[in-house]
Amino acid sequence: MMKSSVDQYVSTLKSLMDSIRVGLCDGTPCSFDDGVSKTLDVIKDVKQNNHKLMFIGNGASASIASHMATDFWKTNEVRAMAFNDSSGLTCISNDFGYKHVFEKPIEMFADEGDILVAISSSGQSENILRGAQAAQRKNIKIITLSGFKEDNPLRQLGDINFYLPASEYGYVEVLHHAICHCWIDLFAGKVKESEEMLV
């Protein structure tokens, strides 16, 4: 019985991995390969011009945001940050309301040429949407990762949008994490390849 359940879980994960949809800001769909390639290109531009990556997410997505920000600067020497400091979150929540916890720091710290990575399983969290809208006002590129409903609002806000057609948090969170690690691991190889071509 347990083996059957495990097999079903793994099978669903594999199927969802193959079902990832990627769209651009104008709604144009592209393949997962092209979406990853475009993401690596904009991150490479960020690194070359000494701009930064900013990650936002709630709950498990906040953990992904912190993990990815740390790995990008540690592994790939890309300036990266996540707005998950407990004092900052509680201060902004107390003074302005929780829906503003990402909007306010993005307004303060985002510079043109930066990238915001907005992670939300449902694609409907108001604080994430407000963060993305603040990024739009600052004229910075946005990459989104979402799931649940196909027409979720976050999916409409990014320059590159990764979407998982699943309604269970576990599946969406696992695959969002996998997508981000794909960027990190492939980016390290892409940068190395570019440096070798210059020699």
Image: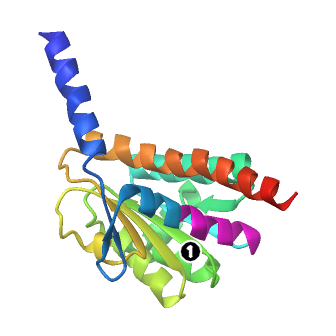
Magenta range: 39-49
Q: Quadrant of residue 69?
A: bottom right
Q: Secondary structure at mark 1?
A: helix
Q: Closer to the camera, 39 or 68?
A: 39
Give how far across and how far down residue 157 sits, in percent.
35, 78
Q: Residue under label 1, please give it.
A: 105
Give how far across and how far down residue 129 sits, in percent.
35, 74
Outermost residue toward the left in this view: 1
Q: How is the image coloured?
A: rainbow
Identified at 27% across, 41% down, the residue is 171
Left or right: residue 124 compared with residue 92: left
Q: Is residue 63 above or below residue 30?
A: above
43 drawn magenta: yes
Identified at 48% across, 90% down, the residue is 137
Q: Which quarter shows the N terminus?
A: top left
Identified at 66% across, 65% down, the residue is 44
Q: Which quarter shows the C terminus?
A: bottom right
State how many labels appear.
Answer: 1
Q: Quadrant of residue 13?
A: top left
User: Predominant secondary structure in magenta?
Assistant: helix
16 drawn magenta: no
Give how far across and how far down residue 77 sits, in percent.
75, 55
Q: Closer to the camera, 177 or 57?
A: 177
Crowding around mark 1 (Cα neighbors within 10 Å: few <14, some 14 to 19, many 20+) is: some
Give how far across and how far down residue 148 sits, in percent.
20, 56
Identified at 65% across, 61% down, the residue is 80
Q: Quadrant of residue 197?
A: bottom right
**Amino acid at dot 1:** Pro
